[in-house]
């Protein structure tokens, strides 16, 4: 659907509400498309690896699971003591 420029000027707020709702509109002159009115999408900057270098600390034993925790997940608490 092509919306005439004159109609677009007259109903700009209504058209902007439609665009804000996710609709894309085509503006034109004499029925010929000349522009698209689309919702604004902010430009996202690519992530930069290493931006937290030196700011995060990980314990040397972070990937070692305590035996009592394993026993709790396996339902075998009878012979395990919580430390």
Image: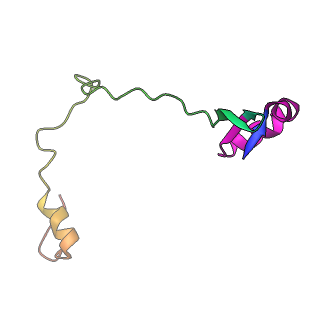
Residue 13 in magenta stretch: yes
What residue is shown at x 61% (from left), y 33% (from top)? 40
Q: Quadrant of residue 50?
A: top left
Quarter occupied by the C terminus: bottom left
Q: Residue furthest right?
A: 10
Q: Is residue 27 left or right of residue 45?
A: right
Q: Nearer the viewer, residue 68 or 41?
A: 41
| 65, 81: nearer the viewer | 65
Looking at the image, which is closer to me, 68 or 45? 45
Report the span colored magenta: 5-27
Q: Residue at x 14, y 49 (%)?
A: 63
How many marks the image carries: the answer is 0
Dividing the picture into quadrants, the one containing residue 70 is bottom left
Instruction: Tell me: residue 27, above or below residue 66.
Output: above
Residue 59: horizontal and vertical position, in percent?
A: 16, 38
Q: Residue 31 at what x, y percent from top left?
A: 75, 39
Residue toward you, 14 or 28: 28
Rendered position, 30 above or below 55: below
Instruction: Using residue 46 as the reference point, say whether residue 23 is left or right of it.
Output: right
Residue at point 34% right, 29% down? 47
Residue at horizontal 63%, vertical 37%? 39
Would residue 74 be counted in the magenta stretch?
Answer: no
Image position, residue 49 (x, y; %) = 26, 28
Residue 1 rendering spot, x and y as whole percentages:
72, 47
């Amino acid at each position: 659907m092509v919306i005439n420029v004159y109609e677009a000027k007259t109903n700009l707020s209504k058209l902007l509400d439609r665009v804000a709702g996710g609709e894309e509109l085509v503006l034109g002159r004499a029925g010929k498309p000349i522009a698209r009115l689309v919702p604004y999408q902010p430009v996202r900057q690519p992530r930069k690896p290493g931006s937290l270098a030196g700011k995060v600390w990980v314990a040397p034993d972070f990937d070692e699971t305590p035996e009592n925790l394993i026993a709790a997940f396996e339902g075998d608490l009878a012979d395990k003591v919580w430390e």
